[in-house]
Each structure stands twice: as C-alpha cells, then as structure tokens.
Amino acid sequence: MNADSKMKYGIIMRTQYPQGEDMVRRTEDQMEQARLADKLGFDSLLKSQHLAGYPLQEFQQVPFLARAMAEAPNMRLLTGVMLLSLHKPLDIAEQLATLDVMSGGRLIFGVGLGYREVEFKAFGTTQKERVPRFMENLEAIRRLWTEDEVSMVGSHFELDKVRVSLKPAQKPTPPVWIGANADAAIRRAAKVADSWFINPHQKMETIARQVEVYRRALDEADKPFPDELPLAREIFIAPSKQEAIDRCGPYLAEKYKVYHQWGQDKAMPDDDNDLSMALEELQEDRFLLGPADQIAEALIQYNRQLGVNHMVLGFHWVGMPQEIALDQMRMFAEDVMPKVEQGL
C-alpha cells in the first residue's frame, strides 16, 4: 500500500544565526515565522538539534518547541531530529510527554544518531556506541510511555521499577520518525519506526534507490508502507533557477559550508557524500530552486514515484533577512500548494 496522496507541508526552524546577532530579537523573528506558517496552513513545525554549533548561534530543541507551540496552535511539533544516543531515556520520555500533553497531542518524535565527535565526547559516549545506545533508548522510551512500570538495564542507565511522571496524550505513543542517511539506518527505521524521515541533503537519485531499500525492509518486517512518508528539502522560489541561486546562494552556501566543516558528509552514502561543492553543483537534484510551476511539478513527482506525502521545507538560512523568508513562505502557500493539490 502506498502513502496517502494528499500532501502535507512542514517548515524547518533551524534558528541558526551568525555570531554577534542579537538572539533576543531573533526569537521574535522565529515566532513570526511560526505564526505565519500556522496561518498559511502548514502542518508541522520542525526544530533540529545541534549542540556546540560554533560558528553559528542556535536555540535548543525542546525549549524552542515549547515556546513555538503557543504561537502555532494548529501545527504539529517535530523533533527533527533529536540525537537520541546522547541522552538518557527517562529524561527524554518525560520531557517529550510534557510537550505532547501541553500541546494537546501534537508531538512527532523524530530521532537520529548524530555524527559529530564534539557532541559524543561532551555526553561521555562515542561514535561506536551510538547505534546500541540509540536502540536501547528508543525501546526504553516506548516502554516508559506504554507500560505502568518499567525495569530495564541499559549500557548507560538502569530503570528500577520506574513509573513516569507523565504519559503522552497520543496513544499508544506519538509517531516515531527516524532520520537516516545510510542504507543500514534506513533498514533499521523500517523495523523500529513508524516512518523513515528522508533528509534534505541527499540527491533525489539516491533517495529513489533508498526508497526501494526501505520498501524491501518493510516487507521483510511484515509492515505496511507508512501512511505518512516525510521528505525534507531546501526551497527558494524565483522566476528562474539561476535567479533563485543568485538570491539565496550566499545564505544556503554558508549553511552547507558549516555542515561540511562539522562532517555531515561522513554520515552520507559513499556515492553521494560531498557537501564541499560550489552551490551551482551542490543544488543539482538536491534543492527546490526556481519557478513555482517547476517546484509544484517536482513535489507531484515525489508523491507519485516515491510515496512522499509530507514535505518539510527550509525557507531560511544563516544570514538571510527575515522579510525574504516570510515572502518565500507566502509565495509557496499561494503559488505552489494549490498547484500540487490540483495535480494530485
């Protein structure tokens, strides 16, 4: 069975700004984006998680979502993604149950492994431990959310007849989406998650191949194709692709330069793992840049060919003026959303 053909849309709130920016003022900018997304009919609001994000400044995920939930009362809140192997399960189970209850059951629990040495060291763990820690944390959180009392010994925690202070509003649990780049991680997502959350930086050619990996893994696990298959993409609307590249280039290129410095490439498949290219080359088959008609057609194809029915879109990058991002969101809602709906 394929995913539902009706398309939903989310907005990526990375909240990344250069050093020296007044982050008190930028808080209001971010809340303005959240309010506009809610008004325009976006379905979900994503906050990523990076720690020690120098040279960028950035808000942290859980407090940001807690603040944004009041500004965007109709939108689901997506941890996109939480670096689960860094954390302790009881802490995360209670924090996220609180978000789910306080938002009236609007949480999507998006999780991933992480790839940065600085984060692993700061949390007293290693790259080598990240998969087993991820798996046991996810199992523990699910049990804490669904069982009355949990006893479980993990590599870095012990739950001794633990009863959580609060269970989520959504039963049995909020949806679990696993962000995964490598084929092995995609197979893992098929086995243990409600959906695979497809990343924004892989080529569509790679993703088309990996959707088949995902389908086969679902079949092996005797699970249906998910009702909701999310895909993240960077987007900028302009009369031509070249004009889009010229206008958003400085901001988008800066973001990917930093991600390359952080080592994001190392977490990507061997045949598609170079984020150091110039933007003209990097954007090809990766980003949605250009006329609204062409972007709408691309989204229709993602749905028909891949089963994608939840597009989570990045409209704002490091250094971009607020008004450009707000204009882009409005243009998308007016010029792309109706065309996609008509096309599907």
Image (cartoon, rainbow, N blue to C red):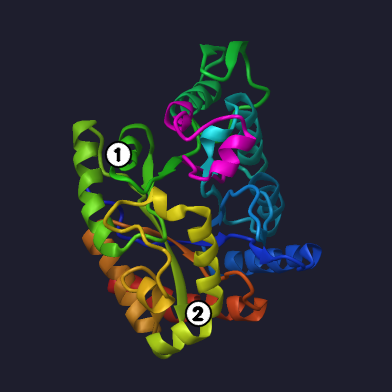
Q: Is residue 209 above or below residue 275?
A: above
Residues rendered magenta in the picture? 106-134
Q: Tag on residue 249?
A: 2
Is 240 inside the magenta-drawn segment? Answer: no
127 lies above or below 153: below
Q: Which mark is residue 184?
A: 1
Image location of residue 335, percent across then percent down: 44, 81
Asked which secondary structure carries label 1, the reply is helix
Examine the image and state in which quarter residue 285 appears: bottom left
Q: Does the CB distance between marks 2 and 1 fall below 8 Å? A: no
Q: Position of residue 293 (x, y in %)?
A: 35, 83
Q: Mark 1: few, some, or many residues within 10 Å (few <14, many ≥20)?
A: few
| Quadrant in which the C terminus is drawn | bottom left
Alpha-carbon span between mark 2 and mark 1: 33 Å
Question: Quadrant of the rendered structure where residue 258 is?
Answer: bottom right
The amino acid at mark 2 is: Gly
Q: Inspect this view and state whether residue 344 appears.
A: no
